[in-house]
Amino acid sequence: MNSHTTFLVFGPAATLKRMSAKMFKDYPPKFLYEHHQEGDKEKLFVAVYEEYEKQINSSVTLTCIFESTPRQNKIILKKTGGRMGFRGSSLSEDRNVEANVIDFILDFGKRFGLTVQEEQVSDVVEEDKDEI
């Protein structure tokens, strides 16, 4: 079971550089941290999105780690909070922030001819099958 979603985006360096600025402009996070060293073309952004779901009386937080290099963008999305388990039918018909951010990544990639790959990595460590 994955607890996070990872996207790798490949394409021209100028387009990759614009992607983070456009995403944080269209979907402004509650908190945004940017780190880069002078002379270094790599940038690291940590954005925290938070939304309150009134119907289920809970808060959902999405942490987005955005690593931007001239060769690729690596975007890690980690959703926390909310309620887990059976709630009956879905009360929320509105799109949540995670769906909006994922749609932006896919749409931006398609619009500008970038290659977007979703990494399938499991967080669960597999047990060694040789041990009995």
Image (tube, rainbow, N blue to C red):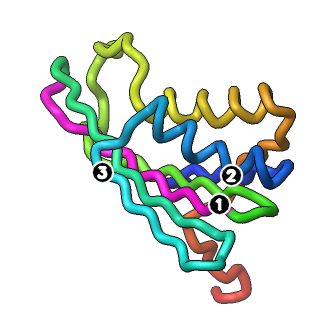
Asked which quadrant contains residue 126, the reply is: bottom right
Q: Residue at x 52, y 53 (%)?
A: 4
In-image side of 17 versus 125 (left or right) = right
Q: Is residue 113 above or below residue 73?
A: above
State yes or no: residue 64 in magenta: yes
Are the two marked residues, 1 and 2, in contact with CB atoms closer than 8 angstroms?
yes
The earlier-in-sequence mark between 2 and 3 is 2
The segment highlighted magenta reads: 56-68
Residue underneath mark 1: 68
Front residue (pair 77, 47): 47
Q: Residue at x 69, y 56 (%)?
A: 73
Within 10 angstroms of label 2, few (less than 14), some, or many (20 or more) residues? some
Label 3: element kind = strand
Q: Amino acid at mark 3?
A: Phe
The earlier-in-sequence mark between 3 and 1 is 3
Q: Amino acid at mark 2?
A: Lys
Residue underneath mark 2: 17
Answer yes or no: is residue 54 visible. yes
Dominant secondary structure of the residues highlighted in magenta in the image: strand
